[in-house]
Amino acid sequence: MEDPATARLKALIVSSNDALEFKLVRVMEDLENDETTFKPEMSHQVFGDSESIFGYRDLRVKLYYSAGCLETYLGMTYSEKVNKMICEGVEADEVLPTIADKLAPRVHDNLDSFIKSLEKDDTFRPQGALLHSFSIDDGRKFEVYKADMTYKGFKEYHQRLQTFVLWYIDAANFIDIDDDRWDYFNMFEKYRSADGTVRYATTGFATVYQYYAYPHHIRPRIAQVLILPPFQNMGLGTHLLHAIYHEYIGRNRVKDITVEDPSVTFQRLRDYVDAVNCSTLPTFQREYLLQGFNKAMAAEAKQKFKINKRQARRVYEILRLHATDLANENEYREYRLDVKRRLNIPYKREQNDLKKLECALKNIDKKSNVTLPTTEQRLQTLEKEYRSLEEEYKRVIKRLDMVCKS
């Protein structure tokens, strides 16, 4: 049984995810409106793997941004702080300096000065070139802009914007803004304030790096994509990705478009957009899908939409599953075997490599300690891999069907 002092100290440990609260402030009333508050998905990139803060009771850490130009306020409140004089020298964690170290320069630590800074949103306009504008079902309007560091004020804006990756993109790093091979895509909601003034609210962003591809091509790689929490589940990610694609697809210098270590959520979005695009191509029609993946599919996907071969194969599998009559036992079996053959390729390579190793060691009277799974074990693993993949594909197909019905 723990002593009262230990129990009291444990009570002063709070989850940093629970303590943090964010806002995108359009008007002063948003500061007191709980409906404008949103939470981080993670905080270990700032507060460590435990995602905890020690030394406070009823802790609230407030990280507020003006909705447009992202003027930033950082503050905190609590009802009790550990007293090191009566707790054997144990001190409370330094919360605000820990967060401030990750933020852009010139953060407001006074709420009144932050409120005053909201006036800047009246004249804020997105930097860059307008790529895409659209409306969603409820009538709200959005725009996507492409910018780089040559636009006046964009560097400072991006330094504030990129801080969101700490809380929503795992293993995120701030990019090197001095490298001119970065492209920046930013999405905004365009709306009118109460007095009729046109204003812009930051909605999300993406960064794309232009890698060199031999002999005189580039290979854009999508690095970070984030739709801010208040705007998620509205279909905005699809529009952002379409805008990125449209920027590069028409360029002869672009070899293909890749993605850097995509999350499950982003891969699902990518699969959906690529499946919609490829479904318009002649080689991806049902009569060809049922015959299997071929070079013509890979070539057309690359030529029309800059989709690399690996992703084209994945899109083929999604569209073939969509075209397959699951009630037709033979048709469905042929599909499963086709996918499993592709999934089994790495295992076949391992088998061949192991045989070569054993032959080499045999010549010098040594035996390999490396073993592969038995056939039965491999079949079980393969079935599990396939089932997981099919469920993921069906998520994409469900969305495709929803769009078709609408």
Image (tube, rainbow, N blue to C red):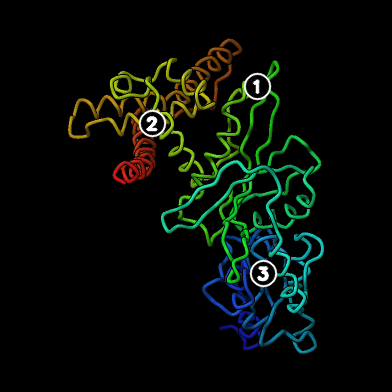
Residue 385, given in percent of the width and then of the height, sits at 39, 37
Q: Which numbered disc flags the more N-terminal residue, 3 or 1? A: 3
* Residue found 71% across the figure and 84% down from its top: 81
- Along the line of sight, which residue is nearer the eye, 60 or 256? 256
Q: Secondary structure at mark 1?
A: loop
Residue 89 location in percent, x, y? 79, 82
Rate crowding at label 1 as few (under 14), some (14 to 19) or many (20 or more) other CA atoms within 10 Å. Answer: some
Q: Residue at x 50, y 23 (%)?
A: 304
Please tell me which residue lies in front, 355 or 341: 341
Tell me if residue 141 comes above or below residue 257 in the rendering. below
Say if mark 2 contacts mark 1, CB within 8 Å.
Answer: no
Give the residue pinned by disc 1: 253
Q: CA distance from mark 3 to mark 1?
A: 42 Å
Q: Which residue is mark 3?
A: 64
Q: Nearer the viewer, residue 337 or 203?
A: 203
Residue at the spot of label 2: 378
